[in-house]
Amino acid sequence: MKLAKHDNVGGICRGYMNKQEAAEFLGVSVRALERYVQQGRIGVRYKKGKTRPTANFDPTELEAFKEELNQPTYKGAIETRQIATDKQQQTDKLVHQAGEIDDLVVVDHLSSIIETLLTRSDRQPTVPVSAKLLLTLAEAQALTGLSREFLRDAIVKGKLAGHVIGKSWRIKRSDLEAYIDNLF
């Protein structure tokens, strides 16, 4: 007769569980169990196996973690950031007074919201394209209205000076302006 790896006594197992058993006990996938281990939420002990170490989980720790997983979670209300500036408040008043929405007002309002979101402190400071000394192909395209292929061909033919920095092309603003001046 084969002995069981663990005996179930009062809902808590004596002995250790492998990954599959632990995942079934918690009601999660093996991958989710591995993520909990990586996050340090569950401890694991490795024992030498025939071909590789095997993961073993303490049932009392799993029982406590299962209770933690089954606890209801409450998320507090998210505070909305106040994006409205004086200018935005004025445009809102103008829209309400006029009774109609002017496309330019809406575009101005949306662009100020986008600018606010893009200039958050956790990102690098943004510099307008008009102030940059080195331009990417996309920025050169936006400034000139020429296609990327046209600009890339000009670089390859030697008509426009450009260099690969990192993984993308960079063009000096002055070289781009000189190239455009010589186009026509």
Image: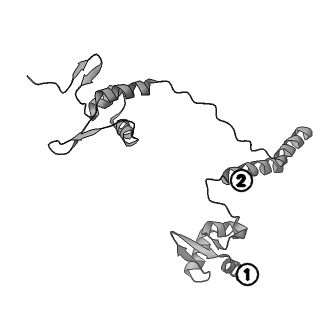
Q: Amino acid at mark 2?
A: Glu
Give the label on residue 115, or none. 2
Q: Secondary structure under badge 2? A: helix
Marks 1 and 2, how far apart at CA:
32 Å
Q: Tell me if 99 is positioned left or right of 31 in this view.
A: right
Q: Earlier in the sequence, mark 1 or mark 2?
A: 2
| Placement of 113 over or under 24, stated as above or below | below
Q: Quick one: SS at disc 1?
A: helix
Q: Which residue is at the front of the view, 24 or 75?
A: 75
Crowd around label 1: few <14 · some 14–19 · many ≥20 (10 Å): few
What residue is disc 1 on?
181
Label 2 environment density (alpha carbons within 10 Å; few <14, some 14–19, many ≥20): few
Q: Position of residue 176 (x, y in %)?
A: 67, 77
Q: Position of residue 68 (x, y in %)?
A: 43, 27
Asked whether, in this view, residue 69 is left or right of residue 7, the answer is right
Q: Residue at x 29, y 27 (%)?
A: 59
* Residues under numbered marks 1 and 2 in contact, where contact means CB atoms less than 8 Å apart: no
